[in-house]
Image (cartoon, rainbow, N blue to C red):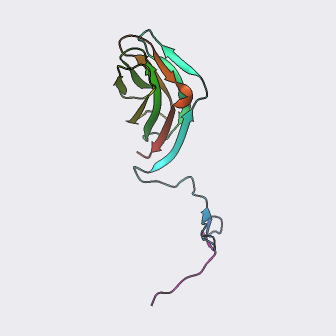
Amino acid sequence: MPSDIQVTNIKASDGTAGLVIADSSGQVTGTLGSATVFPAGHVIKTTSFISTAGNTDESSGSYANSSITSGSYSHGSGNKILIMCHLKLRTTGEGWYVTIDGATGNYESEYYTHDGTHIEEQNLMWLDSPSGTSTTYTVKFKRNSSGTATFYNNRSSMVLQEIKG
């Protein structure tokens, strides 16, 4: 026959660390110590980056910075970063290239379009293996072969997830 054990707190033997057990609302409170070890593949943190800047144009065929950047993004050594982007661009030519500056791999995506009158959406996902403990990720873009590529900064976003290595 099953039975219940009813307690309100669990504490370390020295009485310092503790965990408050769920009350009638179902809430469990407590703090994980800095020595907590998560398994490989565990999501450590998720951060979103957006911009309120206006559009950025590029017509030279060289990569230009968008306003979508992480700044100095701190992460654990040996962890991976899942980069997810939702981008909006338009071109008067045949398409564009997008890359993530700061990523360790050669992450480049090409998009073709023959109708420069519509704003196109492009969703990208890359798994990066950065070195060190801080990386700055910036979305860059350029036109494909001719015309002007327009990046809609305030309608684009980047999400970074730190994954335990």
Q: Which of 34 and 58 is in front in this view?
A: 58
Residue 53 image-quadrant placement: top right
Eyeballing the image, is 145 above or below 127?
A: above
Q: Nearer the viewer, residue 96 or 94?
A: 94
Q: Nearer the viewer, residue 17 or 159?
A: 159
In the image: residue 23, left or right of residue 121: right
Residue lying at 44% horizontally and 20% vertically, measured from the top left: 117
In the image: residue 141, left or right of residue 8: left
- The question of residue 5 being in magenta is answered with yes
Residue lying at 54% horizontally and 26% vertically, measured from the top left: 153
For the N terminus, give its image quadrant.
bottom left
**As drawn, which residue projects farthest toward the top?**
60
Residue lying at 35% horizontally and 22% vertically, measured from the top left: 113
For the C terminus, give its image quadrant.
top left
Residue 17 image-quadrant placement: bottom right
Eyeballing the image, is 74 above or below 97?
A: below
What is the number of callouts on the image?
0
Q: Position of residue 137 (x, y in %)?
A: 49, 29
Eyeballing the image, is 4 above or below 143?
A: below
Q: Where is residue 128 in the image (x, y as percent from the top left)?
A: 40, 35
Q: Is residue 134 visible?
A: no
**As drawn, which residue projects farthest toward the bottom?**
1
Q: Where is residue 70 in the image (x, y as percent from the top left)?
A: 54, 31
Q: Nearer the viewer, residue 91 or 161?
A: 91
Q: Can residue 162 be seen in this view?
A: yes
The stretch in magenta equals 1-11
Q: Which SS does the magenta portion mostly show?
A: loop
